[in-house]
Image: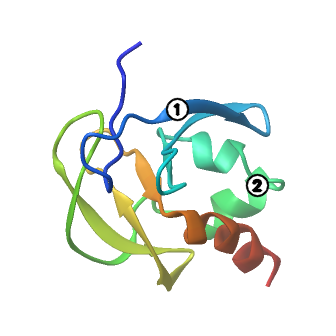
Amino acid sequence: MKELDCPKCPASPMDQKTVDGVAIDECPRCGGRWYDLGELGRSMKDPYRFQKAAEGGGVIKPRPGSALCPHCAKTMINGGLINEFLRVDLCQGCRGMWLDKNEIGLVGRLLQA
C-alpha cells in the first residue's frame, strides 16, 4: 500500500489506524485524519444520520483550499460539512476528505444537536 503524506504537515507520513472498525490514515504530528470516500460515514456511531446530514456529497460554501490530496496530489477545496462552520478539505477527484484534529469530534456533536 502506498504511504500517504499528511496534507497539512509537509513530508510527514500518516499512520494507518482502525477507528470503529474502519481503517483510516492519521497524522502522528497534527492528529488530523484522512478519510477515503465513505469511510467517515462508516466510522460514525449513527451512519444513517451522518448520511442524511451530508447528503449531496459535496461541501457547503466551497472555496479553493491549499492542502493537497494525499492520493491525487490535487489541490482540495475547503467547505462546510453538516453546516457551513465545520470546514473540511475535500478532494474533488477521489472524493476523500481531510479533517483536522479539532474537527473530528465536532462531526459527532453536530449530529447530536
Identify the residue at horizontal 76%, vertical 63% (top origin).
49
Identify the residue at horizontal 46%, vertical 62% (top origin).
56
Q: Which amino acid does label 2 sit on?
A: Tyr
Is 99 rendered above or below residue 93? below
Quadrant in the picture for the C terminus: bottom right
Q: Is residue 50 left or right of residue 100?
A: right
Residue to which mark 2 is pinned = 48
Quarter of the image for residue 101 reads bottom right
* Viewer-proximal residue among 67 and 110: 67
Q: How far apart are marks 2 and 1 (CA)?
A: 28 Å
Residue to which mark 1 is pinned = 15
* Percent position of residue 83, x then y: 53, 82
* Viewer-proximal residue among 96 and 9: 9
Confirm whether residue 54 shows in the render.
no
Q: Is residue 10 left or right of residue 40?
A: left
* Viewer-proximal residue among 60 and 31: 31
